[in-house]
Amino acid sequence: MPEQDKDKDKDKEKDKDKKKPVRWLNPASGYLTGYAYTLNPYVGCTFGCSYCYVRRMPIALFKASPWGEWVEPKRFEADSFRREWRRAIAKGGVTVFMSSATDPYQPAEHQEKLTRRLLEVMAEEPPQFLLLQTRSPLVLRDIDVLSRLGERVRVSMTVETDLETVRKALTPFAPPLAGRLRAIRELRQAGIQVQAAVSPLLPCSEAFPELIASSVERVVVDDFFRGDGSGGKRSAQLKMADRYRELGEEARYTPETADAFVQALKAVMPSESVYFGQEGFLP
Ligand code: SF4
């Protein structure tokens, strides 16, 4: 049996006990209005960021285990997704945000290759636009497929701070910052469109704007007050002000901190490359 067919059989075996989604492409809404669809390959996310707004959504609130401690890969069937994808493409205007409630390159993706398998089908008939939102260097594994999507894909790599101490305090299970910056470099070298998502901005050093300017041609900044999809309510429920206080950073827990950061970025890179909030995530 050819190697490719053996891989397909292994994938089928791996997926047989998983739940098949009713549909992969879900109509986008709220903060992601501007996209036609969102696509979440997984339910749950083991990066478990302390500020993740999904923690306040029913999917996390009604689960027995805490957010960050579980992940459920969806059951992928290439033919079924291909049919759904082609139907959407035939209608036109396919813009996809991947992903709104999980990270498509979280640790489970090493084994599952679910994101990769979805991308492979998308590459057969590319969408109008696909945004891949991640904080994982694992995205580098899929440079070959991303290249096939060409100008139609942008990787948005979260880099919320340049301080590992802050990253370890607030998102200890997310990939180290150096790996994310390396991923940005390698994606750009491969000709893949990429932006840095300083979202949400966390306490950082004075050198952070320069680091961003030297790493990317496009950046989007967001904060806990305007970027949590609820005008700051979810961030308050997640007690982010207390987390800042524990770090001795309470003075920075203000919307003005992000405004000043945007100005600092505009001083070191073209202002049209610096976005704030929702507009920076749009197609
Ligand atoms: S990576 Fe994204 S989805 Fe996952 S826990 Fe962090 S913020 Fe939430």
Image (cartoon, helix red, strand yellow):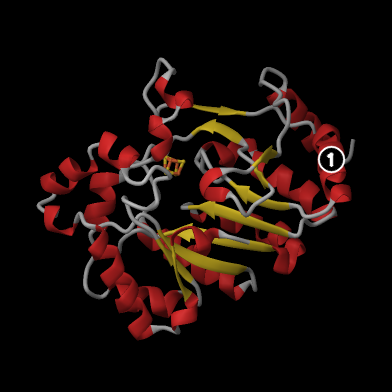
The number of numbered badges drawn on the structure is 1
Please tell me in which quarter of the rendered image ligand 1 is found. Answer: top left
Residue at 50% from the left image edge and 77% from the top image edge: 217
Task: Quadrant for residue 270, please give it.
Answer: bottom left
Q: Is residue 91 visible?
A: yes
- Left/right of residue 68 with respect to residue 79 in the rendered view: left
Residue at 72% from the left image edge and 57% from the top image edge: 145
Q: Residue furthest top?
A: 64
227 up-or-down from 103: above or below: below
Task: Quadrant for residue 127, please give it.
Answer: bottom right
The N terminus, quarter of image = top right
91 up-or-down from 18: above or below: below
- Left/right of residue 108 with respect to residue 246 in the rendered view: right
Neighbour tally class for label 1: few under 14, some 14-19, many 20 plus, Cα within 10 Å: some
> Foreground: 274 or 65?
274
Position in image of residue 266 (x %, y %):
37, 80
Q: Secondary structure at mark 1?
A: helix
Residue at 40% from the left image edge and 27% from the top image edge: 69
Q: Which residue is mark 1?
A: 82
Residue at 35% from the left image edge and 77% from the top image edge: 265
Q: Is residue 68 visible?
A: no
70 up-or-down from 115: above or below: above
Q: What's the residue type where badge 1 is placed?
A: Arg
244 up-or-down from 187: above or below: above
Q: Does the Cβ of the disc 1 residue fall within 8 Å of ligand 1?
A: no
Position in image of residue 233 (x %, y %):
32, 39
- Left/right of residue 192 with respect to residue 56 in the rendered view: right
Position in image of residue 236 (x %, y %):
26, 39
> Foreground: 6 or 130?
130
